[in-house]
Structure formats: structure tokens, C-alpha cells
Amino acid sequence: MKARRTALWIAAISCIMTMISCGTGKKALTSADIDGQWTIVEAMGQAVTGNEGNVPSINFNVAEKSVSGTTGCNRFMGGFTLGENNEVSFSPLAATKMMCRDMKAEMLIFQATEAARTARKDNEDLVFCSEDGNVVLKMTR
């Protein structure tokens, strides 16, 4: 019985954390909140760094519905939309195909763009979350 109560508490706390992490009810974002260059600091819950001094970054242009950037190894480009209720979506991204020493950041960044469903500002950071509310991409200026 005690184990069941503990499990229920853990489940309740998890639900609350999910709602807080990327819950609805946040201020509607505008193109001014998103447009421009951002440094990618976290993807799929893991810190990302570049290769040989190349910092992962992303550039949004909401009006043109486009995105471009670098994974710290390869450059990428594609479509991006900001919809109602801070919904975001990426079209499949095109990328160069150089081989770098560490390809993990690139894999995580591309996974994050596929999983991203909503956006919010967290102080000065821009955060994208998955359908279940988990932070999948964190960026800073």
C-alpha cells in the first residue's frame, strides 16, 4: 500500500513538472521573440557543444517561414512555422554531409527539431518542447 502511494505521488509530481516545463497558458510568442540568431545549448535533454570551436546555432525567420544554422559540424536549412498557441513545426531539414570528430550534437539537434511541438520563452532563453511537454531544444542569445 505504501509503495502504491509513493508511486501515485511520483506520478502527480511528474505531471506537475510537465505542465510547468512547457505548459499552455504562457504568453503568445511573436516573430520578434523568435527571429534571429540563437546559440543551441541543449538538445534532447543533453548539453551540446560544437566541433573544433564551431558553436551550434540556429537562425529563425518567421516571416519567410525558414530556418538555417549549424550543428557545430554541418550546416542545415529548411522550413519553420510558428502557429497559434505557440505551436512550432520544422519541415525536413537539408544539411551538408561533412564527417566530424563528434556527431552526437548533430544527431540530438535533428532529433529535437523533429520532436518540437511548442515554444516558450524562459527568461531570455527560447525553449522548444515535445508533445508530452519535455524540453527538447534550449537556445540562448
Image (tube, rainbow, N blue to C red):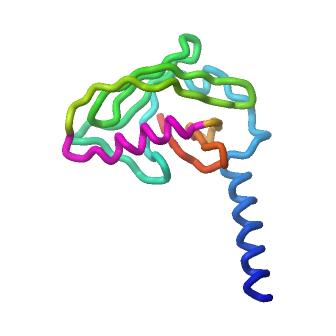
Give the total number of marks visible in the rendering.
0
Residues 63 and 99: in front is: 99
- How far from the left and from the top, in percent, is residue 3? 73, 85
The part of the image, by quadrant, that contains residue 128 is top right
Residues 5 and 32: in front is: 5
- In the rendered image, the residue lying farthest to the top is 64
- How far from the left and from the top, in percent, is residue 28? 73, 29
Q: Which residues are magenta?
A: 100-116
Q: Residue at x 65, y 43 (%)?
A: 131
Q: Residue at x 37, y 43 (%)?
A: 107
Position of 106 with respect to 33 (left or right) is left
Position of 54 with respect to 38 (left or right) is left
Residue 104 painted magenta: yes
Against 65, residue 110 (above or below) is: below
- How far from the left and from the top, in percent, is residue 20? 71, 52
Position of 134 with respect to 102 (left or right) is right
Magenta stretch prevailing secondary structure = helix
Where's the N terminus, which quadrant?
bottom right
Position of 16 with respect to 75 (left or right) is right
Q: Residue at x 23, y 39 (%)?
A: 53
Residue 51 painted magenta: no
Q: Residue at x 55, y 15 (%)?
A: 65
Against 24, residue 95 (above or below) is: above
The part of the image, by quadrant, that contains residue 69 is top left
- How far from the left and from the top, in percent, is residue 113? 50, 35
